[in-house]
Image (cartoon, rainbow, N blue to C red):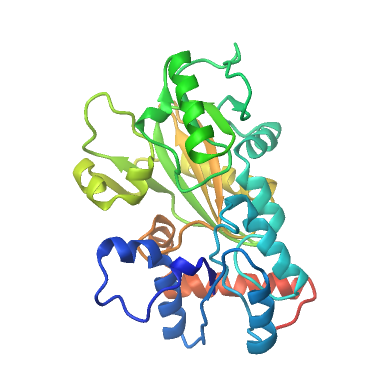
Amino acid sequence: MLTHPDLVPPRSRRGYSEEEINSWKTEYDVVTTLRASGHEVRPLGLENELKPIRDEIESWKPDVVFNLLEEFHGEAVYDQNVASYLELLRIPYTGCNPRGLMLARGKDLSKKLLHYHRIPVPAFAVFPMRRKIRRPTHLALPLIVKSLNEDSSRGISLASVVDTDEKLEERVTFIHERIGTVAIAEQYIEGRELYVGVLGNDRLRVLPIWELEFTHLAQGTRAIATEKVKHDADYQERRGILDGPAQDLAPELRARIERAAKRIYRTLELDGYARVDFRLTANNVPYFLEANANPEIARTQEFAHAASHGGLSYSALLNRILALGISRASTAGIGV
């Protein structure tokens, strides 16, 4: 199992604080569940060298690599290169292929592709670093400003939604200087936050549509999935942040969202497993926000909850992800 060295989990959670456990809970859940399923699992921490992968593969000869690595050399955009290296080594691995990782990672490229295929996407503009920040005339306020290629809501706060050009400049500058990436400003879509998990390589299984709900937001606060909403348990409890099966979706609308998720998955050449995020407007238009290749799969995360609601236990989900990685390798002529 590949992950960052800081996220290699201990044998037991005993003696660790909730904050400490939260940082490596995915890795812990994956390792312990796979071991309980009868697999022999060896975690490998990887930060800035590829050689340990090759050494481990040559000495231990694993059947498959469970890839939980989200960055390399401190850069999230390098995760695709690690997947490419695994392919060069001709070793089966879980999760998305390098091309899908690249297409989904860029919030601008993915939206251009999907707009071409008539998937509703918010209007947007990209703001490169060290360039004058000027809003295009076609891009109406309010906007939400994000990092172009970071995920897990990194850099997103309530201040990310801007309604003046001055605030736009401030927030783009924040992304440039504090996050260190190019910024993207998208049309802010008011509506319900929906997540659709998809499993598969060729034949796709769509998990039940999941919704992130904001039940105790302060008056005038925008309902957006900030870093605090995603990762701060105390904030989630204070603000009544809940997730669960999306209710009150007409059968035709539900089917339309599921079809859109499959089209997006195939257009972006995703495989293994991914989560597609939408904003559903009051007039039932599902706008594509982003696709998360290799999303969080901790036992307590939305993807695992949706799988369980759809009849797939956590153990069955992880073993299905393993099987998909092995099947893809087999199709490419890589034996296990």
In percent of width and height, residue 28 lies at: 40, 73
Residue plotted at (60% across, 57% down): 73
Locate residue 45, reporting x and y percent: 53, 72
Camera-side residue: 272 or 131?
A: 131
Q: Is 303 placed above or below 327 here?
A: above
Q: Which quarter of the rendered picture does the C terminus lie within?
A: bottom right
**The furthest residue to the right:** 333
User: Outermost residue toward the top?
Assistant: 137
The front one of 95 and 62 is: 62
Q: Position of residue 183 (x, y in %)?
A: 56, 32
What is the total number of numbered labels drawn onto the structure image? Answer: 0
Query: For this view, does 198 lie left or right of residue 309?
Result: right
Q: Quadrant of the N terminus?
A: bottom right
Please state if 229 lies on the left or on the right of 97 as rendered.
left
Q: Residue at x 56, y 31 (%)?
A: 184
Residue 37 position (above or below residue 66): below
Quadrant housing residue 98: bottom right
Whether residue 94 is visible:
yes
Task: Pinpoint residue 29: horizontal percent, then vertical percent.
Answer: 40, 72
Of the pair 162 and 130, the residue shown nearer to us: 130
Mark yes or no: residue 263 visible. no
